[in-house]
Image (cartoon, grey):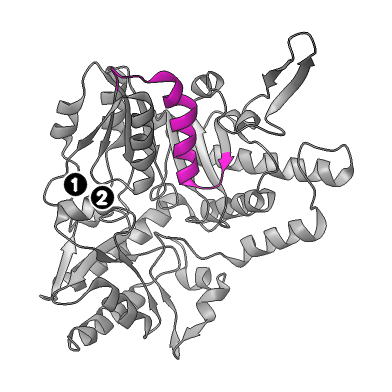
């Protein structure tokens, strides 16, 4: 395990006070805070190296290109991809899933086909498939959950038919924290000649993820949830799949050549090599450099240690909240089956009111649907309060949180 007190020193924002109270930041499922190492790496880039990538022979462009490609290499190592050819930089998880939908699904699915997802998904893993289903005529089917919030695997298996072409699922729910068995789902998909798309937004920042061991076809995740700047996201794809896909954004750098024929009055286009054919235009170089530094930071802590630290925090939070009869918890009560997310409601109180009252004491949580309205419908909740933990959070913060919650209940 790592020394949390030492880790906290790396995060300048944790020194801030709100309404006279030390910040307790429990909104990590939305975005994480940034350590000084990442902040300085980005500052250093803009101060010393700033130039465009793959555009010039001059020194600054060559140095920037090396740093940018190095960020791809760090990301590939983190998830055990075969190389940078399998790592495409995008804005966020949402864009990564849309890239799959428009570059693969649009060209491979038709009226006789089906996509299977689940009722626990973030809107980012629902909306693109529903939009494409209207364009291509395929059907989107939803696997249910059990009453404890875990995936109903039997229901999922029954939905799979010879028409199933895609199974797309969150590795971990951003509401209940449930961790899905990706190995089991991967086997189910591939036995039925379907591809597996995994939303890793809530898993990659918090636990070891090995794309080859799990046999994932596509994995999407975001840098800003794992200590990196906003605006940098990652799509992992098996090389053989990416090679046979056309890009869905065209422009500079994603082409090898564009030749005009006066006779035909058109241009013939040859795509760039992987991963650049999917990275059109000037990329978020500063974000990529910040991502590389964030990955190095997490690797120094050890992803197994990150997961265990969060598990202990989650278990402590569940224990304290279960002792309060006014708290309604959503999802499993066992920290071994979930990541560091605890969603709940206070009986007789609106979730937004609870969040605002907590904010008065410097405690930052999320309230609402968390971009997962169908799951809340299934849980019978019109929204919820979500506390989510990360490497710089402590048991003492959770105890303070539980203490303040008890005070808030008395103002109903």
**Image location of residue 173, percent across then percent down:** 30, 50
Name the foreground residue: 262 vs 165.
262
**Image location of residue 230, percent across then percent down:** 56, 56
For the question of whether residue 80 can be seen, the reply is no
Which residue is located at x 79 percent, y 61 percent? 47
Is 194 displayed left or right of 144 in the figure?
right
Label 1, secondary structure: give it: loop
Which residue is located at x 48 percent, y 62 percent? 32
Name the foreground residue: 108 vs 85.
108
Marks 1/2: CA distance?
A: 6 Å
Which residue is located at x 82 percent, y 41 percent? 62
Q: In the image as oriented, which residue stretches furthest toward the top?
A: 263
Q: Quadrant of residue 318?
A: bottom left
Residue 356 shows which numbered tag? none
Q: Is residue 224 above or below residue 264?
A: below
Which residue is located at x 13 percent, y 52 percent? 148
Decide: marks 1, 2 in contact (CB < 8 A)?
Answer: yes
**Image location of residue 36, percent across then percent down:** 62, 67
Residue at the disc numbered 1? 150
For the question of whether residue 48 can be seen, the reply is yes
Is 321 displayed left or right of 195 in the figure?
left
Is 330 displayed left or right of 56 in the figure?
left
The span shown in magenta is 89-113
Q: Is residue 99 magenta?
A: yes
Residue at the disc numbered 2? 178
How many neighbours does mark 2 have within 10 angstroms: few (below 14), some (14-19), or many (20 or more)? many
Quadrant of the snapshot with the C terminus: bottom left
């Amino acid at each position: 395990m790592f020394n949390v007190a030492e880790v906290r020193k790396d995060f300048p924002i944790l020194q801030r006070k709100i309404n006279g109270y030390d910040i307790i930041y429990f909104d990590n499922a939305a975005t994480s805070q940034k350590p000084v190492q990442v902040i300085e790496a980005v500052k250093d880039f803009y101060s010393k190296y700033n130039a465009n990538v793959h555009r010039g022979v001059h020194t600054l462009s060559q140095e920037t290109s090396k740093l940018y490609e190095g960020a791809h290499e760090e990301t590939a190592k983190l998830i055990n991809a075969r190389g940078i050819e399998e790592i495409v930089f995008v804005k966020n998880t949402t864009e990564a899933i849309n890239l799959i939908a428009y570059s693969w699904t649009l060209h491979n699915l038709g009226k006789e086909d089906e996509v299977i997802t689940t009722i626990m998904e973030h809107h980012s893993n629902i909306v693109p498939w529903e939009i494409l289903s209207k364009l291509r005529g395929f059907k989107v089917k939803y696997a249910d959950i059990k009453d404890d919030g875990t995936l109903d695997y039997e229901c999922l298996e029954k939905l799979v038919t010879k028409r199933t072409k895609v199974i797309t699922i969150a590795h971990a729910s951003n509401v209940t924290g449930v961790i899905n068995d990706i190995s089991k789902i991967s086997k189910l998909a591939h036995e039925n000649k379907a591809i597996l798309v995994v939303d890793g937004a809530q898993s990659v920042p918090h636990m070891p993820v090995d794309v080859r061991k799990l046999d994932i076809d596509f994995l999407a995740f975001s840098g800003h949830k794992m200590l990196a700047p906003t605006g940098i996201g990652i799509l992992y794809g098996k090389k053989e799949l990416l090679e046979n896909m056309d890009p869905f954004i065209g422009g500079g750098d994603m082409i090898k050549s564009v030749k005009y024929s006066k006779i035909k009055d058109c241009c013939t286009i040859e795509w760039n090599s992987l991963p650049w054919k999917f990275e059109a235009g000037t990329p978020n170089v500063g974000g990529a450099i910040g991502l590389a530094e964030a990955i190095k930071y997490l690797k120094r802590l050890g992803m197994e240690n990150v997961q265990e630290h969060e598990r202990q925090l989650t278990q402590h939070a569940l224990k304290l909240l279960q002792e309060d009869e006014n708290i309604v918890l959503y999802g499993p009560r066992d920290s071994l089956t979930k990541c560091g997310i605890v969603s709940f409601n206070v009986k007789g109180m609106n979730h937004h009111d609870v969040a605002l009252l907590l904010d008065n004491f410097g405690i930052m949580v999320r309230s609402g649907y968390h971009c997962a309205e169908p799951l809340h419908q299934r849980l019978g909740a019109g929204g919820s309060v979500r506390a989510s933990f990360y490497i710089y959070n402590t048991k003492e913060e959770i105890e303070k949180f539980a203490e303040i919650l008890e005070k808030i209940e008395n103002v109903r």
